[in-house]
């Protein structure tokens, strides 16, 4: 067993989640490589020192560069706003340090391409934080699809819907400014990643992206919103299968609508993130009178469940997804083996999003770029 010094950039919602995961991953998975919480950088030096005390880091850092440059920091976790991702990642890779980066990979397709190039030139572990794909339930779905459990897939429908901006009276905040902070930059990447992971490449799509509320209350009166509230796309996968994706931050009543439904020639699968420890499976077996969806509760027989709990149906939660990611990142550093999802998966998602905006602008079907850089 040996230690590795971790530098964490960002002390907010995701920064705390990663700090907790890094502190817990050794106990949960008995990893040979154990994180040493070395330095944390946040929006100000004072907040960095406060987060260091709260999260158990040895020291705060005056800025992200001081954390990345510190020789005791051997790997970097990026949990700061997406417009900062590229500079931080490039600086870490230039020093030969592995990087875990929260989604989206960057604030633009150009950022994503540059970050993939830097990661692959450095030749060190790189991983992007698509945590929802790591639930035991969805890992099990991936297995079932690979084994042909529902036959040839004929249709995929996915959504990521929440309602944190459903009320027009909700005040203007940082999510209301900048394309990268809109629904297509914030929520869409997760479900696009899911669709790519379960179904493979998207070859073409037709998208519509809209703003529902043009202004929101501000300190000095109505303040303009300049990004999207929801969007949808029809698409075709490389397999020939059709699909549909919908993303919304104004889906009244939806709290964690990371959901999908998959139809096949021998059955169907349903999943909803608001019930993340269950998968619904339909098989076209037996008499019609007794056919129906079966609810499968996750348990020790499913991927990455047992290290958290020995009881079937007791369930795992959001934080556990982040701990699984931390385990995979540490394994990649320790063994040198490829880790999934690498930065290149973030580029694939960015390519779909960029194509969606192009389609929404002219109302046409567009091919999705598969260029490597």
Image (tube, helix red, strand yellow):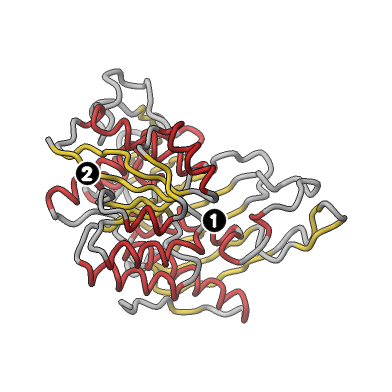
* Residue 122 percent location from the top left of the image: 22, 68
| Position of residue 185 in the picture relative to residue 326 (left or right) | right
Q: Residue 35, located in which quarter of the rendered image?
A: top left
Q: State the quadrant of the C terminus.
A: bottom left
Residue 4: numbered disc: 2
Q: Residue at x 30, y 71 (%)?
A: 118
Where is residue 187 shown, x and y percent of the image?
53, 53
Residue 117 position (above or below residue 83): below
Q: Is residue 239 visible?
A: yes
In the drawing, does residue 111 fall left or right of residue 69?
right
Q: Residues within 10 Å of mark 1 (few under 14, many from 20)?
A: some
Disc on res. 289: none
Query: Which one is earlier in the sequence, the residue at label 2 or at label 1?
Result: 2
x 42%, y 43%: residue: 60
Where residue 36 sits, quadrant-wise, is top left
Number of callouts = 2
- Labels 2, 1: front one: 2
Please provide percent x and percent y for residue 260: 46, 48
* Residue 257, horizontal then vertical, whole percent: 54, 43
* Residue 186's disc number: 1
> In the picture shown, does residue 84 fall above or below 72?
below
Q: Is the C-beta separation of discs 2 and 1 under 8 Å?
A: no
Residue reaching furthest top? 311
Q: Which residue is located at x 38 percent, y 31 percent?
A: 294
- Residue name at image x 21 percent, y 48 percent: 147
Crowd band around label 2 with a 10 angstrom C-alpha radius: few (<14), some (14–19), many (20+): some
**Residue situated furthest right in the rendering:** 221
Question: Can residue 293 be seen in the rendering of this structure?
Answer: no
Residue 170 to residue 239: above or below: above
Q: CA distance from mark 2 to mark 1?
A: 31 Å
Label 1: which secondary element = helix
What kind of element bears circle 2?
A: strand
């Amino acid at each position: 067993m040996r230690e590795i010094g971790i530098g964490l950039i960002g002390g907010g919602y995701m920064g705390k989640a990663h700090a907790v995961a890094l502190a817990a991953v050794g106990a949960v998975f008995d990893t040979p490589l154990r994180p040493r919480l070395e330095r944390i950088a946040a929006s100000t030096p004072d907040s960095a020192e406060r987060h260091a005390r709260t999260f158990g880091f040895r020291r705060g850092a005056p800025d992200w560069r001081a954390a990345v440059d510190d020789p005791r920091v051997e790997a970097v976790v990026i949990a700061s706003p997406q417009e900062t991702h590229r500079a931080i990642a490039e600086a870490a890779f230039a020093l030969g340090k592995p990087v875990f980066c929260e989604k989206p990979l960057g604030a633009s397709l150009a950022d994503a391409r540059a970050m993939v190039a830097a990661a692959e030139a450095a030749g060190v572990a790189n991983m992007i934080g698509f945590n929802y794909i790591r639930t035991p339930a969805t890992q099990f779905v991936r297995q079932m699809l690979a084994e042909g459990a529902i036959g040839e897939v004929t249709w995929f429908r996915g959504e990521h819907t929440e309602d944190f901006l459903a009320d027009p009276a909700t005040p203007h905040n940082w999510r209301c400014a900048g394309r990268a902070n809109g629904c297509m930059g914030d929520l869409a990447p997760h479900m696009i990643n899911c669709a790519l992971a379960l179904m493979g490449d998207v070859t073409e799509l037709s998208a519509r992206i809209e703003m529902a509320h043009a202004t929101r209350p501000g300190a000095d009166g109505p303040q303009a919103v300049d990004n999207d509230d929801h969007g949808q796309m029809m698409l075709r996968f490389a397999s020939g299968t059709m699909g549909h994706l919908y993303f919304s931050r104004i889906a009244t009543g939806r709290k964690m609508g990371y959901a999908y439904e998959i139809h096949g020639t021998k059955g169907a699968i349903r999943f909803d993130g608001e019930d993340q420890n269950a998968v619904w499976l339909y098989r076209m077996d037996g008499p019609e009178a007794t056919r129906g969806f079966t609810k499968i509760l996750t348990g020790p027989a499913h991927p990455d469940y047992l290290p958290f709990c020995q009881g079937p149906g007791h369930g795992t939660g959001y934080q556990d997804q982040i701990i699984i990611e931390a385990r995979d990142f540490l394994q990649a550093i320790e063994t040198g083996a490829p880790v999934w999802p690498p930065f290149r998966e973030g580029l694939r998602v960015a390519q779909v999003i960029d194509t969606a905006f192009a389609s929404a602008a002219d109302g046409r079907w567009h091919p999705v770029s598969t260029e490597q850089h």
